[in-house]
């Protein structure tokens, strides 16, 4: 029924006006939709089709313009022209998609294949190679730069490269899962490879390439979870950090202090928990392909930790009553001797 409202006579009397309305309407809507697509991080190569599909008008516009004309808010002739422009936008969309597929997308794909400004093309010689410049890799890179240690940073996200350039960082465009790009990035000369990519599959592929072709590299890797941690260990990567482990301990420290525990008591408790958790992960690793055995080891470890902490709470209460300080601290409440801290430091090679 809404199609009956199209006044072809009005459209034929003012074809130029209809054409201008059509072009202006589609262009304006395309700009808004493309901006939204970029804001919600729709993949770069999908944005043209997404924009064109949604740039056409909708049938609801017929109802709105008719109602506006009936209420006297819009002249009848103008309402007819607007309805005609909306109808033409719907009619032209399939044709525009054909043109997009034939002429625009091939060039767009070629543009994507063409390395953007900042692509790694010349061989690099920095001692540190960082794969991934997201929320994890950025922190590592900033610490190295602050210390004056040069690093070659690779990332294959166009959006991340744009952000990096905005803040003045030099990040090369490249997919670190490609052996040729790892060579160009200087993996053969570098001393350390930092695996900071977000996808576990990409992380594992890069680790495998590095272990096979650049065995001299010391690999420091980010693990999203314990499964990823185990898979990296299977590849021979020893320095693996679970990405949320340390931040979770910091949050736990804040919670304990809000609950009334003193700072020294909290630090002793978390040091003990951290040491135990890292050791437990090492104990579970040989059984990670045997789920039943791994769960049994985990339960045994949790039980041991609970018993140990309960015993320390009793000792703490006794020491507090006697005024001799907290367990794990000296008689004056001071920190442990460096020799006592050594096991914890050694275990940091697995998770900082």
Image (tube, rainbow, N blue to C red):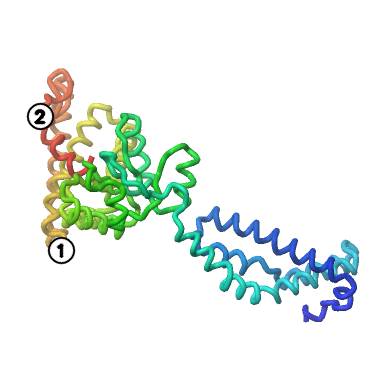
Residue drawn 9% across the image and 27% down it: 339
In this picture, residue 94 sits left or right of residue 111: right
In this picture, residue 336 sits left or right of residue 40: left
Residue 67: in sight, yes or no? no
Q: Secondary structure at mark 2?
A: helix
Q: Quadrant of the C terminus?
A: top left
Coordinates of residue 31 in the picture (x, y in percent):
65, 57
Mark 1 highlights which residue? 289
Picture layout, residue 157 above or below residue 334: below
Name the one closer to the observer, 112 or 91. Answer: 112
Picture layout, residue 121 above or below residue 170: below
Q: Nearer the viewer, mark 1 or mark 2?
A: 1
Mark 2 highlights which residue? 340
Coordinates of residue 90 in the picture (x, y in percent):
70, 74
Residue drawn 16% across the image and 63% down it: 291
Residue ranking furthest to the top: 332
Coordinates of residue 113 in the picture (x, y in percent):
45, 61
Name the one closer to the observer, 81 or 150. Answer: 150
Residue drawn 27% across the image and 57% down it: 179
Name the one closer to the observer, 226 or 80. Answer: 80
Q: Quadrant of the N terminus?
A: bottom right
In space, the residues marked 1 and 2 are separated at their CA atoms by 34 Å
Residue ranking furthest to the left: 339
């Amino acid at each position: 029924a809404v199609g009956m409202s199209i006044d072809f006579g009005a459209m034929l009397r003012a074809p130029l006006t209809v054409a201008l309305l059509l072009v202006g309407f589609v262009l304006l809507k395309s700009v808004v939709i493309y901006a939204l697509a970029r804001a919600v991080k729709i993949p770069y190569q999908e944005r043209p089709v997404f924009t064109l599909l949604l740039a056409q008008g909708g049938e609801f516009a017929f109802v709105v313009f008719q109602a506006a004309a009936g209420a006297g808010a819009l002249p009848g002739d103008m309402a007819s022209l607007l309805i005609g422009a909306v109808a033409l936008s719907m009619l032209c969309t399939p044709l525009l998609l054909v043109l997009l597929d034939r002429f625009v997308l091939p060039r767009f794909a070629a543009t994507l294949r063409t390395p953007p400004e900042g692509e790694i093309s010349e061989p690099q010689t920095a001692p540190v190679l960082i794969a991934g410049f997201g929320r994890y890799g950025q922190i590592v890179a900033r610490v190295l730069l602050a210390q004056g240690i040069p690093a070659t940073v690779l990332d294959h996200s166009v959006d991340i490269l744009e952000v990096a350039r905005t803040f003045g960082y030099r990040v090369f465009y490249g997919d670190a899962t490609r052996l040729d790009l790892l060579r160009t990035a200087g993996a053969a000369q570098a001393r350390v490879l930092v695996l900071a990519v977000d996808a576990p599959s990409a992380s594992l592929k890069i680790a495998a390439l590095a272990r096979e072709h650049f065995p001299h590299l010391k690999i420091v890797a980010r693990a999203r979870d314990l499964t990823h941690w185990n898979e990296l260990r299977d590849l021979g990567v020893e320095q693996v950090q679970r990405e949320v482990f340390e931040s979770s301990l910091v949050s736990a420290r804040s919670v304990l202090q809000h609950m009334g525990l003193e700072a020294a008591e909290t630090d002793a408790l978390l040091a003990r928990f951290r040491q135990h958790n890292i050791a437990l992960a090492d104990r579970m690793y040989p059984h990670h392909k045997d789920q039943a055995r791994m769960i049994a080891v985990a339960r045994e470890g949790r039980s041991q930790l609970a018993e140990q902490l309960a015993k320390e709470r009793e000792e703490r209460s006794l020491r507090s009553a006697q005024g001799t300080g907290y367990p794990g601290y000296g008689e004056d409440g001071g920190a442990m001797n460096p020799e006592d801290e050594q096991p914890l430091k050694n275990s940091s090679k697995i998770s900082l």
